[in-house]
Amino acid sequence: MNVISGISGFDLVQRARKVAAVAGKFADDVDRHGRFPAEAVAAMKAEGLLGIQVPVELGGIGASIAEVAETCSLISQECASSSMILAMHHIKLSSLIAHGRGDAWHEGFMRRVADEQLLLASATTEAGIGGNLRNSICSIEVDGDTCRLTKEASVISYGAHADAILITSRANKDAAPSDQVMTVFLNGQYTLEKTHDWDTLGMRGTCSEGFLFKGEAPSRQIIPQPFAEIAAESMLAVCHLLWSGVWYGIAVNAVSRAQAFVRGAARANPGSVPPGALRVAEVAAKLHLVKASITASIQDYERVKADPAHAISIAFLVDMNSLKVTSSEMVIEIVDQAMIVCGIAGYKNGTPFSLGRHLRDAHSSRVMISNDRILANSANMLLVHKLDTSLLG
Amino acid sequence: MKQDIREILAKLGGLPVSVDTISDSADLYTAGLSSFASVQLMLGLEDKFDIEIPDHLLNRRSFASIDAIAETVSAVRAGQEAA
């Protein structure tokens, strides 16, 4: 299946592969030094990948979430950090597209994202909120045509390299913690003072450092819809879908390496089946499960999105949570098993079968929004939601 | 019915403000209703009104205000009586 064939005159797969080749060339260096993958992001901009989701009438190509997920997966096969940056950018962009239409400033900004290939970062976490992005402590101050915000943002992935930051806060100084808005601040409208380093096990190139954010911008840059609606209606689902696309890329590359290793062993000893072959079959079955889960969830998302009267139901949210938990658990398991197949060649760095970076990157999946938090959220929803018992839904 | 809804909201809504200060049409999420508390609220309503809220009504809009909740409860009751 080529989900991308629908876009005429813009060969997304070919462009994604070009970016993946650049990302792959620098992946080990990015990982070793925990540095921003500047070469890969420059290639994304050169190939126009930052604007693909922008609607055609605003200068993009109107790529679907399926197409963005495929793009992320292709790049992730070479460098998961680069791919995660692209995914996080597109999660922010999807919120703008879903909630900023009809608003002159935000439509103009989307056009700029496509024309100038602006990289968007996200600042939804804050010191003191305990990881729940649906709460804010800081509040935006609206003073006539100007708004001001100071936020102790404990994580802004690639914040120091972004062209704009979409940041959450309480809607005003008297608002409840969950009464939030999201505002676009352009580079130049804010200062960042680094407060936390990013020296991690994996996903080292995302440079998800913490900052004290101080910004001032025209108040029309506040997205009109409450953040509660943005989170519930588009952001959480897109987040789980695109993250899963990134993780699938890690997993499929690990399995490809394991398969290449076994094939090499089979060629060296014709007439016998190498011991790792059975494990490759086993891990391929797990990979298939993740793929099926992601593609089914993308179809669900597109179906819900296509029907404007359809409200996001608890059933849909439970399914998206299930996708996140399943794909993150499975990618770790898949890379781990692929390493057993490749043995020392997989454990060592610098071989064609090295899987150390894959394993470390994969381990980010369970803690990027803790699976325990997500399961607790589903557990609560499953108190009222009765699971659909049909096979085809 | 709205008085019953207000009592359940006061008990399970976890709102940072008194329910008395919230009008029937006010947005409860803006008032501070969390997604966790909204599910607890749904459970409280099912128990109080002896109803089972069907999946197609388990969404944010059905519980966005006291008016919306009253409509949801009425719709479920009408559906259950017809069944």
Image (cartoon, coloured by chain):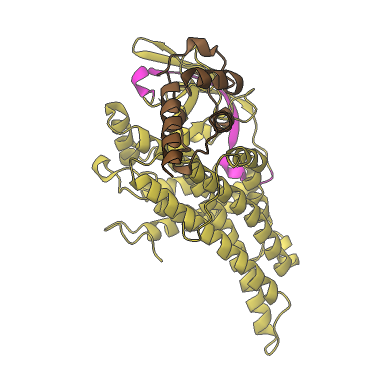
Relative to A301, A289 lies left or right: right
Magenta stretch: give its range.
A201-222
Kindly indicate the quadrant of the structure image that contains residue B82.
top left
Q: Residue at x 67, y 49 (%)?
A: A363
Q: Is residue A289 above or below residue A148?
A: below
How far across and down, in percent of the image, does residue A242 sit?
49, 48
Q: Is residue A186 visible?
A: no
Q: What color does chain A have in the rendering? A: yellow
Q: Nearer the viewer, residue A239 or A44?
A: A239
Q: Residue at x 67, y 88 (%)?
A: A270
Q: Residue at x 29, y 28 (%)?
A: A103
How far across and down, in percent of the image, does residue A76 sit?
53, 54
Q: How many marks?
A: 0
A217 within the magenta span: yes
A311 within the magenta span: no
How far across and down, in percent of the image, does residue A344 sit?
75, 66
Q: Nearer the viewer, residue A327 or A365?
A: A327
Q: Is residue A324 above or below residue A231?
A: below
Q: What color does chain B have in the rendering? A: brown
Toward the right, the furthest residue is A344
Toward the bottom, the furthest residue is A271
